[in-house]
Amino acid sequence: MILPKFSVRQDKDRVYVTIHVAHVRTTSIELDIDGDQLKFSASPYYLRLTFPGKVVEDEDSNAKFDAGTGDILVTLSKQTPGEHFENLDLLTSLLATRREQANVATNVARPLIEEIGTVDNSGGIDELLERARIDEDFDWEMPQQLDLGELQVGSAKYGFNQQYTGYLTHVHSTANEINEVVDPDHSTPESRRQHRIACENAKFDQEYYMENYLNDEDIQPLIKHPLSTDTLLDPEFTATEQQTMVNLPSKTLLISNKQAVYLGMVDLLFAYSLELRSHLGELTIESAWAIGAVSSTLSNLEQFSTLRETCVASYRRGLAYTLYRHWDLCERAMDDVRVICQNGRRAILKVFLDLKRVFDEHDVYYVYSKLFLDDYCVWLQVGASDEVLKSLADKLAHIEVEQEEVEWDLDALEDRVLMSSDSEAEEEEKEEQEAQEEPTRRPLIEML
């Protein structure tokens, strides 16, 4: 069956679903309304939508087919007039089943293999909600231990939720300049981390950093550039973005380490924000590489354990791999991340849809959409918690990365720059004074 293009809107009392189906017989069209669910079929198309609230068929409900455009407009009345259905433009969440939406509502993670009839919900919804609250009350500075016993040579897992393998087997035979992992499919999280740190240490250029620190006339406008909040407060998704959401893979995401998923999100948001700020709010043809190089998640398949180590790694790569390598620029980009998280999953989804667009359009780097971005775009609609994101934003507001944490003795480099600058200024001042005194000396010489 083919999933048709569709869009959903609402007013105070009704929900309107527009379904685009080309060349179908009106006699084959079937519609079924069941509480919060709409089922549509017209061979070869099938669509099932699960709404946040219940709808009913009454005298105001109808379906109209426009043969010229191939659009079917379905009008449904809300069971509770005046009720506002949240996030109707998060189309992937509307495609989720009732069970998947119930799991999201309670944040109850199910096992990878579930035996039918073994789930005990006798405690009721209160118990489920309490379990969800405990489950997502993250300590952002408490490391989540990896189960090293499951990491066997030749079966390395990476990508979103560490669930992929084999995607990067031949990465070194491609023009992939983002990847730094020597042998992804025979690596471990620890080997990847050690190699990442070694690459960063080798890449960091003291002279480059000192030059950017001293001559930052081009960098200061980037630091002062305002973050556009127009789309963050209540982002509206374009038709292209809505279609991208519809085309996302249909899957149930069973998250084994939720904290690591949120931290990977922070890493990607930082790389995106730094690249955007480095070009005054615009992306370039090199942005896929630039974002991938700064992101430890993409370049080294990193899985973080704490928020602090995520921030430190972001700063290190922001000072070693970018066009502009300035501490204040990194701090401003991390504050952008805080603002985006504060505005919730809709704002973050807007960013990740843009990330997906950038990587999908690249002949080589599209693989990172398959490994990370597609799943993040699904998870942000059906799995991410706005409460957790607010907690994360609050933590980002209070965390402060110190220069010594990046281990490159930045304080000493900056002192050296200032001393050198002072010496040059004194020398220039001395030369100016000598030049001013020269005309008064010349007549004395002439008299002699």
Image: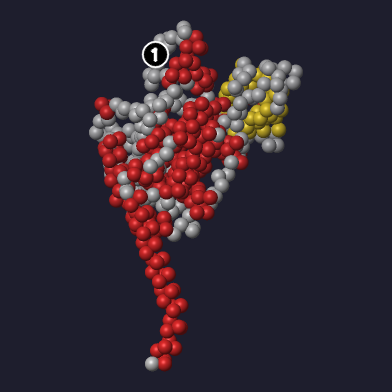
Residue drawn at point x = 53 percent, y = 50 percent: 224
Q: Residue at x 71, y 25 (%)?
A: 12
Residue placed under numbered mark 1 in the picture: 115
Figure quadrant of the C terminus: bottom left
**Residue positioned most to the left:** 153
- Closer-to-camera residue (279/173): 279
Report whether residue 79 is seen: yes
Residue displayed at 62% across by 20% down: 53
All told, the count of numbered labels is 1
Measured from the top left, where is residue 15 in percent x and y? 67, 25
Above/below status of 345 relative to 182 = above
Residue 248 image position (x, y, % from top left): 50, 34
Relative to 68, say whether 212 is above or below.
below
Work out whether residue 352 or residue 322 is closer to the camera in this orientation and state it.
322
Q: Is residue 38 left or right of residue 221?
A: right
Does residue 355 show up?
no
User: In x, y percent, where is residue 145?
Assistant: 31, 27
